[in-house]
Image (cartoon, rainbow, N blue to C red):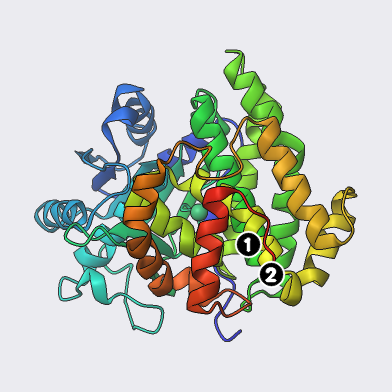
Amino acid sequence: MAQPYLSPRIFYGYGKLKQLKYIRGNKILIVTDKVIVDLGFIDKVTKQLKKSKTPMEYKIFDEVEPDPSDTTVLKGAEIAQEFKPDWIIAIGGGSSMDVAKMIWVLYENPEIQIIEINPLQRIKLGKKSKLVTIPTTSGTGAEITFGCVITNAKTHNKMTLANFAITPNWAIIDPNLALTMPPKLTLATGIDALTHAVEAYVSPLKNDFSDGHCLKAIQLVFKWLQRSYESGKSGTPDKEAREKMHYAGTIAGLGFGNSSGGIAHGIGHSIGAVLDLQHGFCVGILLPYTIEYLDSTSRMNFEEIVNLLQLQNGKNATEILANNIRKLLTSLNVPLNFKDFGVKEEDFKSKFEKILQFSKIDLSTKTCPRKATDDELKKLIEYSYYGKSIDF
Ligand SMILES: [Fe+2]
């Protein structure tokens, strides 16, 4: 790969939010959503900022919605243009961090159109401000990656936008902020992290550095996700499990960001956008089907994962990995197909063409190690709806 291995400066550990007191600047734009404000997390952020040696003025943009749109980005960018921050702090889930990345780009480069952003473009960032990301969920990896997913408000298509310059300056990985994450979110983000790591491990853009991160992340998810989820459900979150899963999300993000996603993300973005379903569940449900689909190109990679985790149950590594991921999903009460997930057949059928069209153009579909024909793509979507193992 020509480009360097990219990562923000990572501060991790319980209590690491205190890193914010070392910020030197005068104007801070905080990008977040209303839930994070209600949880009192912004107060925790400003408490640390007040300890900085420089006097600061804050502005809070808390209008980020789930599956954020380009309209929200433009609104935030306008606020940044007026306020002129020297630091932008994104705190929340993947949506807040994705929006903050785009606000950062448009604030420093007002001539750029969001839709045009691509990995080959020359974008300069850092002249006016720096970006800090603080995840409050464990798994999106958005705190690390130089890409983001923004919904086109007109077409409802989820646009994957990426450029190396968009790598955040700091990422603060403080498990305290994920301790109270609701069980459903723990699951969705945890299986998203697993999907990032598996897909990046078989991508044509994989490399020795991303491989290390992917394998570690897969290992952590298999070991800690269930405990993190169950303990959260019981109301007494297991601190160690929460910590390990918080790191797993970031570590998977390092692998994913420096390699790429694959077809579970390509189709997952599309199903999620068209049927309005949570991202992590979409890609997680798709993952075993896409693993089966990649048997001809990636069995050796699956063998490495299976050996590392000492997994069994199947006649070859592809089957063993797919079976074990299905077993993990079942143990977490995640349905194994979209029909069981609650998508009505008439909705699925009436929106099938749109899902297919969006899947075809998604950037993540293009980095799948097996080039999917239209017919294969169709079947993958159908099989994952009805719960049929891949036979092509
Ligand atoms: Fe994802």
Residue type indicated by callout 1? Thr
Q: Is residue 265 left or right of residue 207?
A: left
Q: Residue at x 50, y 71 (%)?
A: 365
Is the residue 320 above or below the residue 191 in the image?
below
Q: Residue at x 70, y 44 (%)?
A: 326
Along the line of sight, the residue nearer the viewer: 357 or 304: 357
Is the residue 40 above or below the residue 94 in the image?
above
Circles 2 and 1: CB atoms closer than 8 Å:
yes
Q: Is residue 337 left or right of residue 273?
A: right
Q: Is residue 257 left or right of residue 239?
A: left
Q: Residue at x 59, y 60 (%)?
A: 254
Q: Whole-percent x and y of residue 332?
A: 65, 31
Q: Residue at x 56, y 53 (%)?
A: 384
Along the line of sight, the residue nearer the viewer: 173 or 194: 194
Q: Is residue 300 left or right of residue 141?
A: right
Disc 2 target residue: 294
Q: Is mark 2 within 8 Å of ligand 1?
A: no
Disc 1 target residue: 290
Circle 2 Cα neighbour tier, 10 Å, few/some/many (<14 / 14–19 / ≥20):
many
Q: Whole-percent x and y of residue 324?
A: 77, 46
Location of the C terminus by quadrant is: bottom right
User: Disc 2 versus disc 1: distance between alpha carbons?
Assistant: 6 Å
Q: Whole-percent x and y of residue 349?
A: 38, 54
Local SS, label 2 = loop
Q: Whole-percent x and y of residue 45?
A: 37, 33
